[in-house]
Image (cartoon, coloured by chain):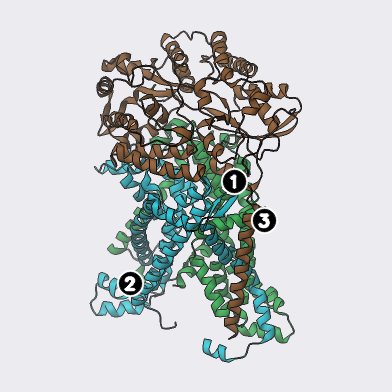
Chain colours: A cyan, B green, C brown
Amino acid sequence: MPAALRARKYNRREAVAGYLFITPWIIGFLVFTLGAMIYSLAISFSHFNLATGRMRPGGLDNYRALLDDPRVAGSLRNTLFFAVLAVPLEICLALLLAILLNRVRRGAGFFRTVYYLPKMTPAVATAAVFLLLLNGNTGAINRGLRAAGIEGPQWLVDPAWVRPSIVLMALWGVSGTMVIFLAALKNVPRDLYEVAALDGAGPIRQFFAITLPMISGAVFFNVIILTIYAFQVFDQAYLLFWRDQNNVAPESSLFYAVYLFQQAFRQFNFGFAAAMAWLLFLILMVLTYLQVRIGNRYVYYEAER
Amino acid sequence: MATTTPTPRTARARRWTTGQVVLFLLLIGFTALFLYPLVWLVSASLKPSGQVFDNALIPHTWRFGNYVEVWDQLPLLHWIFNSVSIAFLAAALVAVSSSVVAFGFAYFRFPGRNLLFGLVLATMMLPASVTMIPTYLIWKQTGLLGTWVPLFGANLFGSGFYIFLQRQFFLGLPRELFEAARIDGASYWQLFRRIAMPLSIPSFIIVFLFEFQASWNNFQAALIYLNGGSVESFTAPLGIAYAMTKYSPTAGGHADYQYVMVAALIVTLPMLLLFSGGQRYFIEGVATAGRKG
Amino acid sequence: MRGRRSITLTAGLVLALGVGTFTAACESGDAGGGATANFGADAAGTLTAWAFDNADDVGKARLGYAAKALPGVTLTMDQTGFDAQKFTARLASGEVPDVVQMDREYVGTYAAQGLILPLDSCFTANQVDPAQRWYANVLDDVRYKDQLWAVPQFYQPPAILLNTTVMRAAGVTPADIDTSKPDVLLAAIAKMYKASGGVPTTLGFNPQAVGQTYLWFVAQGGKLVGDKGVPTLDDPSNVRPLELLKRIVDAQGGFARYKSFTDAFDVFGDQNQFVRGQVGAEVDAQWYANVLAPYKDKAELSAVPFRGSDGKPVAVAYGGSFVIPAKAKNPAAACKWALRLTEDGAWNAAAEARAATRAKDKSVNTGLFTGSPGPDRAIREKFVKSSGNAGFDQVVNTFYDVVATGRSAGLSPAGQQLKQELTTAITTTLLGQKTPQKALQDAQTAAMAAYTSIAGG
């Protein structure tokens, strides 16, 4: 179809009208995406103090500082750790829930609604609740564990458990991913299972031989989106640990986006923060590229594509 | 969507098999896990200050007064008004602008269309933190810092995911409909206004609800753009974050977390209502996002 | 090749746009520093004040006093608390208030960048001798490069509150709670500390390592700020206080459990840590005595001073202050207003208001700690009476006694960062992630980076 299109001559009036219709987006793109990115590149090569409004050229200073600042590497490591822990867990839990919902014959609608509620809950409310639920001594989570004979960790204080506590909050809101899986599962032709069952394949073999390949597109999409989100995690970490400047915040809770925000809006270093933003952009580009490369090898695309 | 029962089976399907019972119990277990924090929130909002930390699901002392006092403690009405206004503006603007742009991509043929649409999709992948700083400076240059505009201004120009979503919808409309109207002398704008828009109400609602929720929950933008103003000018999420600090003993507060809980609950409720009213739109919107993959 | 051309066109357009905004940003960047203001001018017109958030009886009385003294001034107030990000946003948006209340420890950051005005001429123009009006350590809190950058207010010294009930049960005497004798102190802690299943139920001594950071370091012989406000967190003298803190916290379940335990204290309620016997002793600022006053008969209280490594009582604490932004539109009125709020008459009005409040709720008047020696003395003599509870009277008197032992931690352009880094060093050390030396070294590196970007930029 694209080839056929290209061969055709464009209708001039129609083309002009088309451009007019998409003009809002073009303006927005030029100003808030492309313009903004070029602007931020320019800032990243300057010393720019937001509070004083002073801006002077800085060459590669900010990028050099990026390498020197142990917190850039540290926050990147924290973020990576979070992503590596959160994304697979989110995928597994979402997939499990979606499969259960797809199988159950009664109440699927009800359960789906309930599971989706956390997704609707504003991040601030989630943070306010988990701040108390995760208290190491009196929090409900550790009380529950204690009832089961397990001494729970100090979620919000112990540096090793700070990131998992944010993962826990992310898992609570996993339903968006679940719904995408559910939609994908509904599109898997049922007769495939019936044929497999006739061949004597058990549920586990069915899952790996049919379900997983058939929904690999959705898995792929979710992995990419969740990774991008994971690298930008801000709200929960900021609200739990960095909101109150008088509080002690473990270093392991300093995520990249939080540090970027601090550099820009607390310490006035717009140049440095812009350099950080570009570094993040490059990292995500590379990651997404790699994911797409790997994904293309495994993802099963439906014939209609 | 909710009623997809693919293979009509006999009465056997309606009966409880062991597998189904196990499945059902598992789902109930997850229900408890997912609901617990929300139930806990309701419970904590009804406790006196000293007991918020005690974690009893049924308060030892019921304190309905929290719901009365909170309005004096925190300018909640202002916050809710601000949040509703901003969310409404953000949602309405982006729904209309994305619809216009989506129609441009769906109906018209023009050079560079596929390339530009590829760019639309690419912007969906662009992390917001990358453009956060220059965007702030752009608003600074326009002199609109300290107003609501930075919180929804960019919505005037459409947004990647919504453009994609609405274009999908327009592509599903039969082209003959438009060709017939063209022959009757309708202008391109009339095609959009008279035919495409009325027919795309469902996708319009999806976009509106999604953006309303996104805007209502948006904390970071409010923190960047509104934190400089008075407490009354905050949005609900920013207000709750402010309350969390205000009552935190490390910041000199009196640990009256019950008010934070009441406020958090009051801010969550509209979203739960929104969801109960527009559930199928939300589910369909999310599912569409996934179908792109 | 139409497509190719449109791309080139787009790219050109974008580039032009980017460059345009970039140069616009450069032009708008005008320096705010170096400005001087005529502080001698009459106070008139509108005055916008921000962050004067203590709208309690004391704050209201002082506001009323200043309003009467400056009839030509119309005041508009934003009562939200000070917040660095918010201040930045205000400066960036150009809507700068005339006078801002902020903690003294943050003043250096703004002084070094020329974002606020030096106030020496504010004092001379209004015939105020700072050395007369404020304690020496309070002035040191706001001195940077030999100039005073803020009008200080309040100095609430810390001391150690004792829970006699807990101490007696464990056989500990007030003399054992001596921060100059670590071994004695640790023995006392061991006697009082109780835990159940690894979770603390009673702390022997809550050091408030994070809330009273400056006290611990400066009083125990450390040095946080050097010449010209340069951070000196890696000074060898800072190792000892940190090691002591670690020993104290380790003796009580370790930092993680200690922190979760203290986080759940009902600090301001009737189930507070003293009433419930959750602490034997605790470092607290003077205002906490006010919080405990209603419970003086439920918990048996007394107090001892915090002792430095030399064995002498010492108090280190910042307090509030008023600064005037360089871009303030009405600096003259701002200067006069801040001075009015901190003069004897204002404090007297405040003390009377406070006495009335206390009489009404039939509670104890523990006095005011204004940052100025004159008013402090006058208020103590006139308004602080015996509460009828010897232990509590001793608490009130202890705080008054340690005021004179005040020392300043100094003022650094790295201000907030320095505090943050020091706090991080404390946390990482107490958690056992780093040795004190390494933690302080890392903190120094980060604080120096902040210092250079602020003072050297």
Dot 3: within a 10 Å radius of its alpha carbon, few (fewer than 14), some, or many (20 or more) residues? few
The chain letter under disc 2 is A
The chain letter under disc 1 is A
Which amino acid lies under the numbered mark 1 shown in the image of this protein?
Thr
Disc sitting over residue A212 in the figure: 2
Left or right of A164: which side holds B147?
Answer: right
Label 1 to label 3: alpha-carbon separation: 18 Å
Viewer-nearest of labels 1 and 3?
A: 1
Secondary structure at numbered mark 1 = loop
Q: Which residue is mark 1?
A: A52
In the image, residue B216 sits, relative to residue C146, either above or below, namely: below
Which of the 4 image quadrants contains residue C432? top left
Secondary structure at numbered mark 2 = helix
Q: What is the quadrant of the C terminus of chain B in the image?
A: bottom left
Which amino acid lies under the numbered mark 2 shown in the image of this protein?
Leu
Left or right of A266: which side holds C46?
Answer: right
Locate residue A71, reporting x and y percent.
39, 49
Which amino acid lies under the numbered mark 3 shown in the image of this protein?
Thr
In the image, residue B123 sits, relative to residue C162, either above or below, namely: below
Q: In this rendering, do the residues under marks 1 and 3 share a single chain?
A: no
Q: Nearer the viewer, residue A178 or A275?
A: A275
Q: Residue at x 34, y 77 (%)?
A: A297
Q: Earlier in the sequence, mark 2 or mark 1?
A: 1
Say whether residue A64 is visible: yes
Q: Which residue is mark 3?
A: B142
The chain letter under disc 3 is B
